[in-house]
Every structure is written in C-alpha cells, then in structure tokens.
Image (cartoon, rainbow, N blue to C red):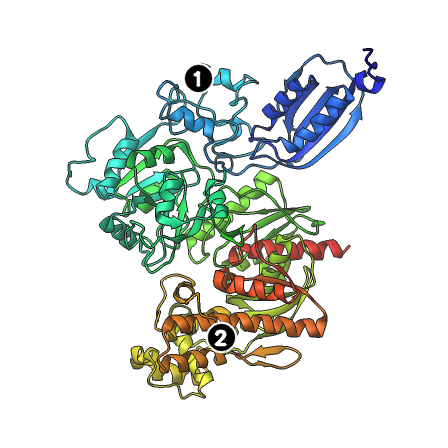
Amino acid sequence: MIQDAPNERETVPIRNLIRVEGTVQGVGFRPFIYALAVRLGLAGYVANDEQGVIIEVEGAAPALAEFQTRLRSDAPIVACVERASATVIPPRGDTGFIIAGSRSNGPHRTLIAPDVAACGDCLREIFDPTNRRYRYPFTNCTNCGPRFTIVRDIPYDRQCTTMAGFAMCALCAREYHDPADRRFHAQPICCPDCGPRLRLVASPRSLAIDERGAGTKKTADPIEAAARLLACGEIVAVKGLGGYHLAAAAANESAVAKLRARKHREDKPFALMVSNLDQARVLALIDEAEERLLLSARRPIVLLRRNPQAPLASAVAPGNRFVGLMLPYTPLHHLLCEAIGEPIVLTSGNVSEEPIAYRDGDAMERLGSIADWFLTHDRPIHIRTDDSVVRAAGGREVTVRRSRGYAPAPLKLPLPARRPLLSCGAELKSTFCLVRGSSAFLSSHIGDLENYPSLLSFIEGIEHFRRLFEIDPKIAVHDLHPEYLSTRYALGLRGIELMAVQHHHAHIAACLADNGEYGPAIGAAFDGLGYGADATMWGGEFLIADLCSFRRAGCFEPVPMPGGAAAIKEPWRMALAYLAAAYADEAPADLDVFRRNRSRWDAVAAAMRAGVNSPLTSSAGRLFDAAAAIVGLRDRVNYEGQAAVELEQMADAAERGSYPARVNGCGAMRICGADLVRAAADDLRAGTPREIVAARFHNGMADTIVKVCGFIRQQHGLDLVALSGGVFQNLWLLERVHQSLESLGFRVLTHRRVPANDGGIAFGQAAIAAARDSTDR
C-alpha cells in the first residue's frame, strides 16, 4: 500500500515565541515544558523572566499545536496559566531543547505560588528506609513544599529565598541540574546532609521547672521525643510553613484545658490535625465534597459536622456541633502524626487576638509562657501565613479564612484597574489587597487590627507585597470608619490619591467580583457593624449596588446599642434594647434574661433611654445576639460571633415554623426586627422549647430577607441577589435564603474564593476602586 507523502506544512520547521503568564515559577513548570518538548521532538528553550516564563520552541506544525494545547491542559497541579500568547518567529535550526537561565530586563510581572502540601512521591521517600531522605522533615520537590513563605524577592530562584544560606550537596546539585529529575530546579531542594535541621528545645517555662523525667532526656530523634511529650500531656510549639502552631493531644482533657488557659482562649474551637481520612472519619461526618477539600494540595482546615461519639477532650470545641480538621501538609507534620498515632490540637501559635508568631526569637518570647517545648528548625520563614479555613456548602467550597495554600494567588477582577491601587480592608479579620490591572493580590489573614503587633504585621505585609509584585499604588482605598487603624494607615500615606468606600458596599462588591459580576444587584449585607453613609452603625442592609455605586433600599429598624462597644461583648444589652422596642419599654419581668441581669438592667435601660453611650444600629448580627441572650444561651461572649454561632447550633433542624416581621415603607424600607424578638420571647414565656424558638427565629430571618428582596424586585426589576457579610456564614440562614430565592426565580450569588466576613472587605474595596478608576477615563 502506497502511503501519502506528508504535506509541506507538516515537515517544514516552524518556530514560536510563547510567553506564559500566571503562577508558573517555582511550581515545576519549566521541567514540565522541557519534558513535553522532548517528548514531542521539539527544539528550543524555556526560561524564567520578570513576567513569567518565556519559551522558544521549534518543530513541525502538528507537534507545535499539540505542545500549545498540552501546555495548558497538562500543566503541574500547582501551576496556573493565566495567559499564553504565541508569535511566529524565524527558525534557528536548534537540535535540542534546554532550560536556560533566568532573565530580568524590566519590571516584574510574575506570580509567586502559594505553599503546597507534600506530594505522594516525597511522602513515599520519607517513609522508605532505603531512601536517603528517610524521615527527613524538609523533603520537597518541584511539585510540593514551601513557596510564598520563603520568598524574599523574585525571580523565584534559590538565592531569593530563605534557602539561600543552605548550600546544596553534590547529590542534591545533581538532582537540581538533571532535567529528567522531579527536583530539577526545585529551589528549596535539600537533604539531611545539606538542608535545615530539626531540634527540640525546652521553653523558658520548662527551664524554670524541675526536671520531670520523661521528655527531659536527650534523644537523636526530635520528632519521636515531641510525640512522647504530647502523649504525656505537654504542650509543644511546632514550627510549620508560615509560623508556629501550639500542639496538644486532642483526647487529653487536662492538656487541652491547660492550652486553653495559657492561650487565654476561653471557648473558641481549636483546629485539629489528623493523620489520614480514616482518623478524620472517627471524629466527623464527611461527604464527598468535604473529602476533596481535606485532600486538596492546599490542605485547609475544613469545618465538618462533628461525630457525637468523637473521642475528643470536651475543651476542644465546647458546645459546638462542628469541628475543624486538617490533614498533615508538611513532611514534619506527617512524621509527627505517625509518631503520636492520635489526633492533635494544632492551633495558631499566638496569644488570642495577636498574629501568629513566625520568627524564632519572637516565638520563644511570646509562646514561652504557653508551650512546654519547641519543635523548631533553622529554615527561616520570611512571611507569616496562618492556616486557611473552608467549608462545603451545596457541594462546593466556601472560604471562611483565606491564607496558606491560597494566598498570594491573584484573584481576577471583573474590570481592570487603570492605575495600581492598594485597598486597606477593615478592622476585624484584616486583610489588604494590591491591584495591578485585573489581578488582585489579596493578602493572607492578618487578624484583628486592635493591637500593635497586628498593625505591624499589616504594615510589613503591605511593604512585602509591594516589593514582591513591584506595585506602586497610586490610589489607597479605605473604609469610612474614621477610627479603624486601616483607615488611619491609608490617611497617613503621602503622595497618593485616597478613596473612601462604605463598608457594606464593599461586602456586596466582594460578592459580585467573586462571581465575575458587575451588577446591578440586590445586595443583602448582614454583619456585626459597619460605618454607614449617615455616620450611624449599619449591619442589616439591603442595597441596590454595582461595582461603582450603591443606594440603601432598606434596613432593619435601628435600635440603641446600650453601652456602645460593651453591647458587642454582652448580648444581654442588645436583648434589653430589642425587648424595649418590642414591648414599649415594659419588658416582661418573667424572662430569664431579665432575671439573670436584674442588678444592672434598670441602670442600663435608663442610660439607653437618655441616649447616653447608646448609638443606633441596624445590625443583623446584634439582632442575633439579642435572640441568643433571650433564649438563655449567652449573656457575654468570648469571641466575635459566638452568640450567633451557638444560636444556629441550638436550632432544631426539623422545625418549619417561622416568626413574621413587618416591613414598613415603600421606598427605603424598614424591617421590624423587634417583631422577631417579641415572637421569640412570647414563645419562651409560653413554654416552647429553646431549640424550637431558635429555629423559628432563623426561619423568620430567612423569610424576611426573601420577602424584602421580592419587594425590591417589584420596584426595580432586579432579579440578581448578592448575599454577603459575616452573618451569611450561618449555613442554616444561607441555605434557606438561597433555596427560597432561587425557587422564586432569582439568580443568587454567594461567596466562593473570598470570605463573606470582613476578610473579604479589601477585595470588595479593590473591585470598587478598579471599576471607578476604569470608568473615569
């Protein structure tokens, strides 16, 4: 049989110049390109430069076409190809393909990958007694390991990371320079002969105590020794990728109680680390979506439904139906979990409300009064990064805290910014965001900007991002609240244009941008507090908003906050305010919330009526606080949102009853939240179980939101709804509102990549500023 001769197009060599932008440095992308080109018989080179990766590739047209397809479809799991543009250039007759040295001829446009969980290949090595990296806790390759937390500058080469002080041994150098090796150009490459060393040291606290036998003996294996200490009830500070954690045996009542007392963390749940999925299933009920989240290369903490029979200390997550679990994400964690053989508490290494400790000296000073021992090492961490927190809702990932594994990967804005900008976020759950074009670089979670260490972390983080991504902002965006430290920081900048953005507009904009939408939409922004355009405290808002502007379409009827900020810490004060509104100042004396606070009730009520330190608020979060106090859950909280969290957990899922709330006005509507409170109080006085009351309150809130959205649609013809604000982290509320709105033909947007809470405010501010700047041309 005579075969057709190949046509000229298939045989004449063609050369393409391909520029690839995105997260393509430090993720094994060049070795991947090398292997792909060799497999397809192509010649040329690949190199890093200031914009990403540059490729010149030469060969037959069919092979070049397949190369460009596979460049995207087969890229390493941690790579993210945002753009790949190809230009035909004259052939050069190359006979092979090489990886060339890095180039830098202009401003940096490349991206840095987040830190990545240890891959299967590296894990097999550390548990293989015949491998030279057996039990080595810093094993990594191009597919896994530290990235963002060790980078000092770009391009992402070893000399620009905290591994610069560790000279490669001959064997590591051979792997590093071998294009066929998976450690080819793996910048953190190391082994026991040339890499960081682990050590176990006593804390200042332990040094001040007499020797106690077990654990004080020297050992050749710090991990085995640390595991024995944990098993004996000691607290061990463990240096991870982005900072220190505090570890304790999760089933040990005294150890967990001791950790809680020393950390000054009264009730807020601790995160746990488990060895594997089997161990996780003993502690929690896990569906397929949650399993995917646990196993993802990002390795976040996943909020899961707690197994009522879980063998955990009661102090791990007191009174909570959920538990936060994560799987090991570094070889050190894998080895430690294997050695102890049981779940461990692994909580941020800090005193409550402070940023996580990441420098060794600072960690010893700040954590020395908490930890008994330190499992540490000599590889510096350049930038602190806390663990990320996610949950599954409706089968998809919902971000609660965006940090390790996610940051600093850029988020795409619906409209690109004409000029580079900085958005400074809010006060609680602080983040900042730098923007270049359509790329928004949202920082890791910092914490609450209510103390100097957190403010310093905020300022240092901004400077690092500016340097790393070479962004010199021309606009600084800030919240309207004049007392926020983030606002004060922005106002203190010189030579930069300032832009103020209302808090709840930023919430809705964050939700719109998170879904690639511009608006307009009906925005339900429900949170604790935010400074309103009228200088009052908002928080239960219905807006008509797009990325440029908004107007207030409705809100909850404002009530006083007796004692101002004290009402945030003491929900009974909000119960007093709502009961006064519901019963015309004659709150029933037979309610338990009145009896529990009788000694202060009259004085606080008198001050409220006189308008003394009782600012008005429309906050939905404060309304939840009032309901929680009335049902007897909590008169004082120990962390933000605690009362509302416990109210959600108390609610009887089978209850379908609902409390009604009046909606007054046809323009700017006012919702009577006091109606919900009165109905709850009347039910309690009639002997209705608290679980039923909590459920009816939730259902009433959901029905009210749906009703108001319906009114706004009738008036303005909008069928797009965006749900944002920390209150919508309440899954009961979110799912009922979402389902009801969709059943009525609304298109509903919820958060995915950024948190609904104040951790998403900086992203929303950035989206608004970019849209305003792009339309001001």
In the rendered view of the protein, which quadrant contains the C terminus?
A: bottom right
**CA neighbours of label 1 inside 10 A, class few (<14), some (14 to 19), many (20+):** some
Residue at image coords 35%, 20%: 129
* Left or right placement of residue 320 versus residue 505 in this view: left
Q: Is residue 645 above or below residue 419?
A: below
Q: Which residue is mark 1?
A: 169
Residue at x 44% of width, y 85% of height: 609
Residue 567 in sight here: no
Left or right: residue 711 versus residue 170 is: right
Q: Give the percent coordinates (x, y) of residue 152.
A: 52, 35
Provide residue 221's location: percent of width, then percent of height.
28, 28
Q: Quadrant of the N terminus?
A: top right
Question: In this orientation, which residue lies closer to the viewer: 708 or 643?
Answer: 708
**Distance CA(mark 1)–CA(mark 2):** 69 Å
Closer to us: 769 or 252: 252
Please state if 329 lies on the left or on the right of 91 as rendered: left
- First along the sequence among labels 1 and 2: 1
Q: Amino acid at mark 1?
A: Cys
The label on residue 658 is 2
